Image: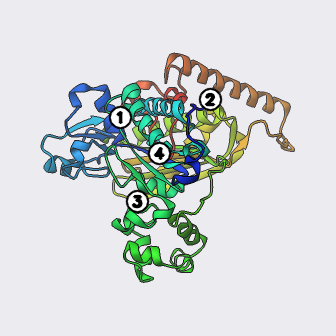
Amino acid sequence: MRKPTISVPAAFFDSSPLVDWLFLDLNSFFASVEQQMRPELRGRPVAVVPVETDATCAIAASQEAKKFGVKTGTNIGEARRRCPGLVTVLANHDAYVEFHHRVLDEIDRHFPVQSICSIDEMACKLDSPRRPLPAAVDLAERIKRGLRERVGGCITCSIGLAPNRFLGKVASDMQKPDGLVILRADGLPGRLLELELSDLPGIGRRMEPRLHACGIRTMRELWDAEREELHQAWGGVCGDRFWHALHGGPTEDDQPVQKRTVGHSHVLAPEMRTPPQAGVVARRLMLKAASRLRRMHYRATHLHLSVRTEDGPRFEAQSKFEPACDSIVLARVLAELWQRVMRQARWQRVRKVSVALFGLEADARPRQLELFSSLIDEETRARREQLSRILDRINQKRGRDSVVIGFTPDTVRTFSGTKIAFTRIPDREEFQE
């Protein structure tokens, strides 16, 4: 995409403070999308939920709900006690992905996105014309205005401008909603001293006690700590990297990541928790993962199945096989694993099912033939893979579950299909797989 042209006096670059990163965090994204699509929800406290029951937890909350202490992870029964007027909305993941791409398209109108950090977080590494602070602020304001005008008035964001991506994220969290916070390298620690240790990415409930054990309890003490102290607290080079990031030094740019697993998990609605119904959901998850595998041009060599029962324990099993991506072979492997796992679980009711394909190989990679394999076996494999790809194309064209293997769509009517993980945004095609 061609970058917009801006006119800046030459002397400006020598005198203005510089920032290197623009970090954008969409405010209450899932709930804001619901309010954008449904005007009757605007101005009302909204919680987005995976299933319609007070026993579940909120996966997102609107700004109005957050004022009552409702946030991601809050039990819905407790949320209703805190906020009597709370409206719960069943999650609509395909809409969130669609709005995610609309947001990306709008940002790209102003400047290319360098990193997609999650469904609601993006980062731009600024070039020379946009590193001067006034130009960076102008870019941030144009992006904010563009989101309101072209994506929707309910879609707001908080933006952090900083010398690295880490501090950009920290800055974006400091003023919500609709904030714009600047952390300059020559002004550090500055507003960082207003924060608690747990406000920083990378310092969670396990890391904070380790810092306390090293005598670090405040942001001032963290800032003044030597690099070696953080190396000790983290137990390795992660502490060194954190020290450099905190002090505004350059951090590692995103590197292409080799795909290692393809999988899905699902928390079952109460009516789907009997072993037969849960088995159907497990099969549906596996078929969905197999379709993704083919679309990514991979074959898998391992299948892992995990179930968590209503009483809490988890049971799991896995199998190794020749590289495969066709649904028929993988369904047979899953059926064997399901019997093994459920015998371990004594056929108890199942709360959660997870399926993962791993040991991935590119399907263009030459494969060594087995010593006793026959040409007929290879032909059968090719025909089954071709059949699976044809089914994929039909479902992409006609809609998810237009053609299925081993179950009817009505048997998984409460299974909502694709969901958004914290750091993985589904492709649009996944909603038809």
Q: Residue beneath label 2, please?
A: 2
Which tag, 3 or 1, sits closer to the chain's start? 1
Q: Residue beneath label 3, please?
A: 313
- Residue 152 location in percent, x, y? 35, 28
For the residues labelled 4 and 2, the Cα–Cα distance comes to 21 Å
Please state which of residues 36 and 285 is positioned toward the viewer in this rendering: 36
Which residue is depicted at the point 27% across and 35% down? 89
Please state which of residues 315 and 137 is positioned toward the viewer in this rendering: 137
Q: Is residue 401 left or right of residue 29?
A: right
Q: Residue beneath label 1, please?
A: 155
- Number of other residues with Cα within 10 Å of mark 1, as a class: few under 14, some 14 to 19, many 20 or more: many
Question: For the residue marked with disc 4, what is the amino acid?
Answer: Pro
Depth check, mark 4 against mark 1: the one in front is 4
Secondary structure beneath label 1: loop
Which residue is depicted at the point 57% across and 45% down? 126
Specify how the rendered protein is coloured: rainbow
